[in-house]
Amino acid sequence: MDGAVLAALAQDTRFGAASARRQRWAWRLRALQGRGLHLARLVKAAFTFDGGIDYLAWKIARHSGVAVAIKPWHRRHPLLAGLWLFAYLRLKGAFR
């Protein structure tokens, strides 16, 4: 939620500062849930389709601009490679 909206809610007599804090907390929680769901969808896509790892590499490169080189061991061990690639891509700035 925008800070100006929360400030306006806190100024309104119907909504106090406690309500604004609850709303801010709820919004942060929802954002965290959204990230988890997005990650779960990507993992499912990797195992659902043939060439799923190629799809993930394309998707990450398209949205972040960070190129992902897929090696043969990534295809053989997608879960281990996924953890390694996540850490590597996080350092490269592919994720917020």
Image (cartoon, rainbow, N blue to C red):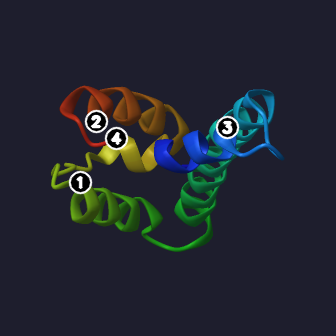
Asked whether the residues under the numbered discs 3 and 1 touch, taking CB atoms below 8 Å apart as contact, a structural biologist would say no
Q: Amino acid at mark 4?
A: Phe
Q: Is any part of residue 73 visible from this angle? A: yes
Q: Please, what is the three-letter code of the amino acid marked with disc 3?
A: Ala
Disc 4 marks which residue? 95
For the residues bearing labels 4 and 1, Cβ distance under 8 angstroms: yes
Give the residue pinned by disc 2: 89
- Of the residues shown, which amino acid type is indicated by label 1? Ser
x 84%, y 47%: residue? 14
Image side of residue 59 versus residue 5, left or right: left
Q: Alpha-carbon distance for marks 4 and 1? A: 7 Å
Q: Nearer the viewer, mark 3 or mark 4?
A: 3
Within 10 Å of disc 4 (Cα), the crowding (few <14, some 14-19, many 20+) is few
Q: Disc 2 marks which amino acid? A: Leu
In the rendering, which numbered label is found on residue 85?
none
Label 3 sits on residue: 10
Report the residue marked by disc 1. 64
The image position of residue 24, as x and y in percent, is 66, 36
Q: Residue at x 71, y 29 (%)?
A: 21
Q: Residue at x 63, y 37 (%)?
A: 28
Q: Is the Cβ of the residue at disc 4 closer than 8 Å to that at disc 2?
A: yes
Q: Secondary structure at mark 2?
A: helix
Q: CA distance from mark 2 to mark 1?
A: 10 Å
The residues tagged by marks 4 and 2 sit, at their Cα atoms, a distance apart of 7 Å
Task: Give the CA separation, mark 3 to mark 4.
Answer: 33 Å
Front disc: 4 or 2? 4
Q: Quadrant of the C terminus?
A: top left
Tag 1 or tag 3, which sits nearer the N-term? Answer: 3
